[in-house]
Amino acid sequence: MTARVAAAATAGHLRVRIPGLLRSYTGGVETVDLDLAGPPTVAHALAILDARFPGLRFRLIDEQGAIRPHIKLFVDAAIVRDLDAAIPPGVELMIVGALSGG
Amino acid sequence: MPPRLKSSAAPRRNELLVATRKGLWTLTGDIARRSWKLAGPHFLGHIVHHAVLDPRDGKTLLAAARTGHLGPTIFRSTDRGRSWKEAARPPAFREGSGRSVEHTFWLTPGHAAQPGVWYAGTSPQGLFRSADGGATWDGVDGFNAHPQRKAWCGGDKDGTPDGPKLHSIVIDPRDPAHLYVSMSSGGTFESTDAGAGWRPLNRGVKADFLPDPDPEFGHDPHCVRLHPAAPDRLYQQNHCGIFRLDRPGEGWIDIGAGMPKSVGAIGFPLVVHPRDADTLWVFPMDGTRVWPRVSPGGRPAAYRSVNGGRTWQRQATGLPKTQAWWTVKRQAMTVDHATAVGVYFGTTSGEVWGSRDEGRSWKCLARNLPHIYAVEAA
C-alpha cells in the first residue's frame, strides 16, 4: 500500500482511480475519494460513484449487472469479476479500460 | 399514382450530421449548396451509429454513442449541437431479462402529434421509446417481451457481422399508433396499436440464405422507408434485393429485377424523394460470393428510379470511375427538401458526397473522416 493511499485509508473511505476514458464524468479528476457508508463491496462503491457522477456506472456495468467486456476492475491490484467482492479497508478500486482494438 | 407534394415553403438549413466510428461531425452548406464547411468532432473516440435532428422543433439532436470500452448511451442537445447532455437513462433491457444493449443503432423522432417522443432500435434487437426528448428510455414491452421475439430474431449473438440490429423504425404520419420496424435479421414487422402487438410483414420478400426461401419471418431487410407523400407506400433495400409494398396490400413486389446484372440489387441504403413517391435512390454494393460489401467492380454509383422501381438509371457523374472500393452504410444516405432535391451519402472510407441535382452529378464535400455510419440532413 502506498503512503498516499494509506493516508486516505480511514474506515469507510475508498479511493477510486478513474481512467482517462471516464474523466468526462469526473471533471477531469483522476482519483476520487468516497465515503463507503454501507457494505464495503464493489457494487456499493459503484453505486456511490454513480450517485456522484450520474451515468458513469452504466458505461461500466450492463443492465444485467455484468462488467462490460473491455472493462476491468481491480481491488488492491487484484482483478475482480464479482461485484459482490469485498473491498478491504485501505485499498484502492482501480477502473481500467482494457484492450479493445482500433 | 401516388401524389407529388409541393415543395415545402419553410426555409431549411443546409446541414448534414455525419456520424462516424470515431465521433460526430457536421457539414454546413451555403444557400446554393455549393460550398460546405466541416465542423467537429463531437464525442471524439465515440462510435456514433446515428445522429438525428428532431424535425418537430428544429433544435433537438440525439446521438447514439458508445466507445470500444464503455457501454452504450445517448447524448442530447436542445440547441442544435452547441451543448450536449447525456441521457439520464439510456436504452437498456429489463434487469433479469438476460439481455444487454450492446449499442443503440437507430433513432427515429416520434409522430408530429407527439412532441418529445422518440424511438430507438438497438443491437441486439430491441425497441425503446422516450417520451421526454430522449432523456429517459423505456423498452417497448409489446416487442421486447413478445413471446415470438426470439423466434423472429434468433439469438442475441446471431445476425450480421456487427451484431443483430433493429432499425428502420417507421411511423405512419397519419396515425402515431401505426408503426413498422425491421430487423437484420428478423424481417419487417407492423404494429397498429402503438407497439403493444406486432406481426410479420414479409410476404414476397426473398430470403435465399434460409432453408425455406419464402418464410414468414427471418428475412434481412437492410433499410425500409415509408414515403411521406404516400404513407401507404414502403420501399425496402434487402439483403436479397429491392422491394416495394403498397398497403393495404400484404405482398412485397420485387423491384430489383430491373437493376443491371453486373451491378446487382444488393446494398445497404435506400432513400426516397421527399415529394415524389415514385422516385427513390439506392447505392448498390457487391453481394456476390463472400460478400465483399464494396462498390461493384470498384466503380461506385447511385441508382435512381423515377417509376417506383420499374426501371433504374445509373448516376455516377463526378464519382471515381475506377478503383474505389468503398460502400455506403444503411443510415449513410439522405436527401434534403430543396426544390431540386439534394442527395448525400457518406462512405466507409470517410468521404461525404453530395448532389444538388437529384443525383445527376456528384461532388465530394469532405474527405479523410473516419468510417461513416450515418449521414442525416438536419
Image (cartoon, coloured by chain):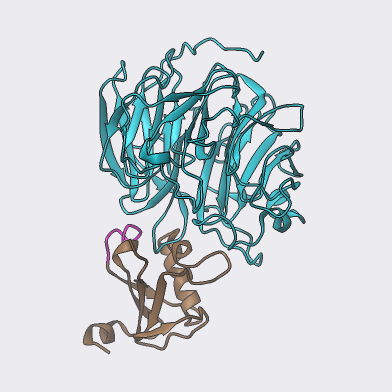
Chain colours: A brown, B cyan
- Left or right of B130: which side holds B196? right
| Quarter occupied by residue B233 | top right
Of residues B193 and A86, which is closer to you in this image? Answer: B193
Of residues B139 and B246, which is closer to you in this image? Answer: B246
Position of the N terminus of chain B, as image quadrant, is top right
- Left or right of B258: which side holds A71? left
Question: Which stretch appears magenta?
Answer: A23-29
Please provide percent x and percent y for residue A36: 43, 77
In the picture shown, does residue A23 fall above or below B65? below
Of residues B249 and B123, which is closer to you in this image? Answer: B249
* Residue B77 in view: no
Q: Is residue A28 magenta?
A: yes
Q: In the image, what residue occupies the spot 56% across and 64% down?
A: A63
Of residues B131 and B27, which is closer to you in this image? Answer: B27
In the picture shown, does residue B17 fall above or below B173? below
Please provide percent x and percent y for residue B194: 71, 38
In the picture shown, does residue A101 fall above or below B134? below
| Quarter occupied by residue B377 | top left
